[in-house]
Amino acid sequence: MVSDFFNKSVFAQYFTQSDAEVQTWVDNVVDKLFKPGIVANYIRRGKGSDAQDADYIAYWTAVVTFYAYLVKLSRVFENFEQDNYLARQYLLNLNTFVTDRETLEELQFIISNRLRDMSRRGTIDSTLPKPVPEANGEMLRLTGYQNGDLFKIGTPRPQFNSWNINNSGPCFRGTTGRYDLNCAYEFTEDVDITKYPLLRPQYITQAGFLGKVCMKISGVPGATESGIYADGSVTEESVSELDPVYPIIPVNPYQNFEISFYVGQDVLASNIKFGVVGLDLEGNPVNFQNVVTGADQNIFFQNVSLNQTNKLYFVRGIIYNCLQANLAAKDAQTTLGLGTNLRFKNNIGGIIPYIVDQGGGGAVYLWNIKVTPSSTFYSRCFLNNKNFFDIFTSNNNGFKTNQEIKEDLRRYFIPYNTAYQATFLKSIRPNGLSNAPALQTEDSPYLLLETGGKTLLQ
């Protein structure tokens, strides 16, 4: 009965009924109350029957135990940074963004660096992940980001923001050429081979081709592959300082993604294979699906030789979201007019591009390799160019809805002269709290056309 009352009290949240500190405090105080000097001597104890002493001790033990709980509770609050719940509530009451994901060490780091953390609002530092015991940037914490999740924020170049032929318009939702949304290994068009996971790097060099700095794959023997590839066994923890490339690119299976690059040959001798490696959040391999037949398939195309030498061909392979219905074969080809695009399975959390020379002589040149979301759920176009942010993330925050996160982004993180749109993707974590059906949960107005500060179409 007593334990039932205790479990319903405020004390149960911070310590147990039989807490050692509580018992020590009770024993000490009851002992002092039993001895002469505090309670008047006419209240008899120690000189009568054992039963009389037992009643005295039982009475004062009950009273003192309640006060011991209060003392223990005050000590807990005095050292609130040592308690996960209290540390989190302290930060929330100070309008510092945390979720139910942070460890006690991370919460203590945030408390110690709270003012410095708040000064980073509106800067790129608020979007950077950090290793334990440091804490992630505050914008990441707002969304409940965890290592391996997709979080991408991009600011398009002017030609992808204003009304521009082939790049941006009121009905256009594509992202090809949006280097700011690139999730792969480098943001420049020219290639730095030190930033890529390489298969048989002895055949790979950095060389010029048609005025571009490319990845050159040459001298590969027949029946041998060399190029961009990793099997996924490399983990973030196992990457050494001598080989700092971490190959796994975070994605979300409820968003369409595209892998794009330019490829050329100086001699039409070797063949090219283009595919992708899929992994779940635990690093286990997962197959993709052929978007036409639904069968497991991880290759866009293979055994392909280009039509002409000394020319760069643009190649784009699309990985459709896991809810995409099967397509007709003519609608599912890559930009080379051959092969088949793929579809995510719903447990894929990371990918590694697979672009290799299949051997046979000659050289293959790769340039401008990018991995980006292939489209947005909205279109936009400004007649006068305007600052704009695109954000792709999942809501793993245990306290806020998508709309509340958008309001906090607007109020605390996005500059007043900048428009933005957030795409909340369905979480792939078992305890993810996002209720997004696929690409977006909550519709909101967005500007399509604007000039002179006046909205022409909303």
Image (cartoon, rainbow, N blue to C red):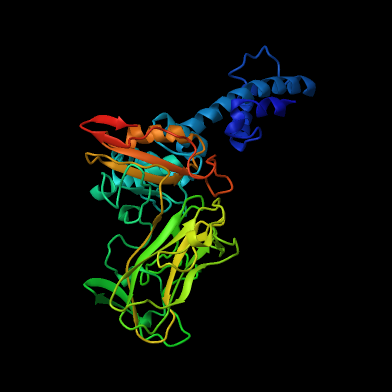
Q: Nearer the viewer, residue 111 or 188?
A: 188
Residue, x 45% and y 34% (percent of image)?
443
- Going 62% across and 29% down the picture, which residue do you hit? 26
- Residue in the image at 49% along x and 55% along y: 320
Q: Position of residue 420 (x, y in %)?
A: 34, 39
Above or below for 167 versus 92:
below
- Where is the N terminus found, in terms of image quarters? top right
Q: Give the vertical position of 345 relative to 197 (above or below).
A: above
In the depicted structure, whether residue 80 falls above or below residue 255: above
In depth, the one of 39 and 398 nearer the eye is: 398
Q: Quadrant of residue 119?
A: top left
Q: Quick check: 147 left or right of 177? A: right
Q: Nearer the viewer, residue 64 or 336?
A: 336
Q: Where's residue 323, x and y in %?
A: 55, 50
Q: Residue 77 vs residue 2: left or right? A: left
Residue 317 in view of the camera: yes
